[in-house]
Amino acid sequence: MTVPTLRGYLSPAASTAAASPLLVLLPSLGTTTDLWDGVVARLTATSEAPRILRVDLPGHGASPVTRDKLTVSDLAAGVLSLVDELGGGAFHVAGDSLGGAVALELAIATPERVLSLAMFCSGARIGSPESWAQRAAQVRASGTSSVVAGSAERWFAPGYLDAHPDGPGPRALSTLMEIDDESYARCCEALGAFDRSQALAQVHAPALIVAGGHDPVCTPASMHELAASLPGARFVELPDAGHLAPLEDPDATAALLADHLRTPSASERGMAVRRAVLGDEHVDRATAAITPETADFQDFITRYAWAEVWARPQLTRAERSIATLASLVTGGHEAELRMHVRAALRNGLTRTQIAEVIHHTALYAGLPAANAALAVMREVFAEQRDGAKPGSEAERAAHPEETNG
């Protein structure tokens, strides 16, 4: 593993801020920390501004060049090393394109360090290994100046450069020609080998996914799919932006980040996890059934079960589903079991795996409990096969107690 030396710029927190969490901002390939200038100016103008660390990629801006092979994991390790130089601890992270990929890698590989994740115009996989290999070869042969024209088309929404001839867009293209060629090529190859699409369920940090409406690289459709795969993620499309949304629309980017960094209450955190695991339909039904007498209990469930236990990073959501299914089978809690069979499917367990959990639990909980659990499982699978909606009038009549979770 090659840990590159990365450098950047640190903006202090507002003197009036109650606390000073660290926000790490990561740029896209071919850009520098300048990408975030407009966003940082807006964030630091507020009374609650966090500390902000902007980091440059190898051979970009303030970071030294590299001749070594790189992976996105290496870049993530370089970010952690720089954060540790500044005192370490957990931090918020946001990135555009390659920076977003590095941010995602941090959230997956070091969940205990990442307080929240924001990905702008990025993905769990971007492009193809072949396309990135071609880009790397082009830059090694002809320099980064050879990709300026293509970058101008990919980076910005139609008409943006003409409308802002003296703005940050032309300056970003000028900066691209100053990037070290070999470092740029190594970053291309890192992106070509990056694919975290099968690990998204491991992300537990609150996630903000932002697409540019005119982005041809990480399209709004692909980013909406990414958000749907991240538990509880928020998706936003900036309709007038291209691939460099923080540069083109710093007002919206700063507003989104400020809201994203706001510390949610335990009830808000728990509700986000609860909806991600159980689904909106179930939670809406349970919420609608709240009475003055049950309100405190529902709040207790949301805060304690979902904001505390289910949100802990030590187990994946799928692993927690396995533990929950086994516990409910053992206790004979068939109504809750029905709900959590559905949740297990949402969390990525297959039907075969769910059946195997019940089969295994029979050894320790007893055959009658497992037999009853298998009957519940079959009903849920049949419900999904037949397209019946959970919570229908018939099901509510049969299972009136299934309103919690």
Image: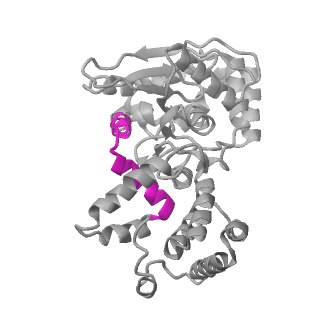
Q: Is residue 41 left or right of residue 62?
A: left
Whole-percent x, y for residue 33 in the image? 49, 21
Across and down, in percent, residue 38 comes to: 37, 25
Q: What stretch is highlighted in magenta?
A: 253-279
Q: Which residue is drawn at 35% across and 33% down?
A: 254
Which residue is located at x 43 percent, y 30 percent? 247
Q: In which quarter of the image is residue 168?
A: top left
Relative height, residue 176 to residue 373 (above, below): above
Q: Residue furthest left?
A: 292
Does the magenta stretch mainly form a helix, a strand or a loop?
A: helix
Q: In this view, does 153 lie to the left or right of 281?
A: right
Q: Relative to 4, does residue 342 appear above or below in the rendering?
A: below
Q: Does the magenta stretch include residue 268?
A: yes
Residue 359 shows in this picture: yes
Which residue lies at the image location 32% right of the left edge and 57% below the top edge?
299
Q: Would residue 158 be counted in the magenta stretch?
A: no
Left or right: residue 154 versus residue 2 is: left
**Residue 377 location, x and y as percent?**
62, 76
Judge by depth and name the residue closer to the eye, 66 or 23: 23
Q: In which quarter of the image is the C terminus?
A: bottom left
Q: Can residue 166 be seen from the camera position used here? A: no
In the figure, residue 100 lies in which quadrant?
top right
Q: Position of residue 147 (x, y in %)?
A: 64, 28
